[in-house]
Image (spheres, rainbow, N blue to C red):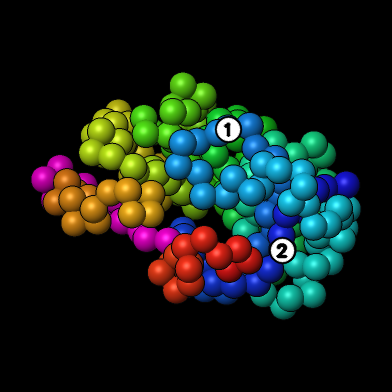
Amino acid sequence: MFNIIEKFVSIDGEGPTAGELATFIRFQGCNLRCSWCDTTYSFDKSEITEVLSAQEIYDYIKSTGVSNVTLTGGEPLFQENIDEVLSLLNDDKNLVVHIETNGAIDILPFKEKYPNIIFILDYKLSSSNMTHLMKLDNLNYVTNKDVYKFVLGSDEDLQEAYELITKFNLTNKCLVYFSPVFSAIKLEDIVEFMKEKNLNKVRLQVQLHKVIWDPNMKGV
């Protein structure tokens, strides 16, 4: 059984299907405590709205009629018995399944078992205070359908992201996104940095759901 904070249909605010409809499943619990986290409510067990089985989660996803699925949190891969959910979703060829994972969990065992699932990995940079927990090997495990998302909260973060992208030749392995912490860093500064470093195949994204709705609104 899985502790669920919320489940809903909205547009995907980030990643390769940004702007498209998606069904979201937000799990309770995370193994990180980032300084700028915008979903701290997912840490608290008092925020649990439902306890669902893997089959019930799958049935809800199918009932929406929406083909894009985003598993988020909290941290989906931190959930005990998450394989039960991933197995059902991996086997359904009519779904496009994204897992938003925080970069602190080894993805290789999951990628080997669930080849149809797309991994959207965060890399927590210095402003998060969680960089020391990042699994660097994940930078070698991603493939061309996966995403590495560098969450930017400062100019120092930008430089650190650039060094990692270069060191690991990341733009030739997977999709790479710059994702600014909302209102923490100027978007024009990121663009100027990208121009200065000639960062081909890196995409700046904004969190669409925070542009459309109040940045603190849940369930969107």
**In this orientation, which residue lies closer to the viewer: 147 or 64?**
64
Point out residue 138 in the picture as x, y percentages from the top left corner. Answer: 51, 32
Neighbours of disc 1 within 10 Å: few (<14), some (14-19), many (20+): some
Neighbours of disc 2 within 10 Å: few (<14), some (14-19), many (20+): many
The quarter of the displayed image where residue 63 is located: bottom right
The quarter of the displayed image where residue 52 is located: bottom right
Point out residue 7 in the picture as x, y percentages from the top left corner. Answer: 72, 63
Mark 1 residue type:
Leu
Q: CA distance from mark 1 to mark 2?
A: 22 Å
Q: Which residues are magenta?
A: 195-207
Count of numbered circles on the image: 2
Q: Is residue 186 left or right of residue 140?
A: left
> Mark 2 — residue?
7
Quarter that holds the C terminus: bottom right
> Mark 1 — residue?
32
Point out residue 121 in the picture as x, y percentages from the top left corner. Answer: 51, 43
Disc assigned to residue 78: none
Q: Residue at x 51, y 50 (%)?
A: 38
Q: Is residue 51 left or right of residue 68?
A: right
- Looking at the image, is 79 positioned above or below residue 86? above
- Looking at the image, is 65 positioned above or below residue 15? below
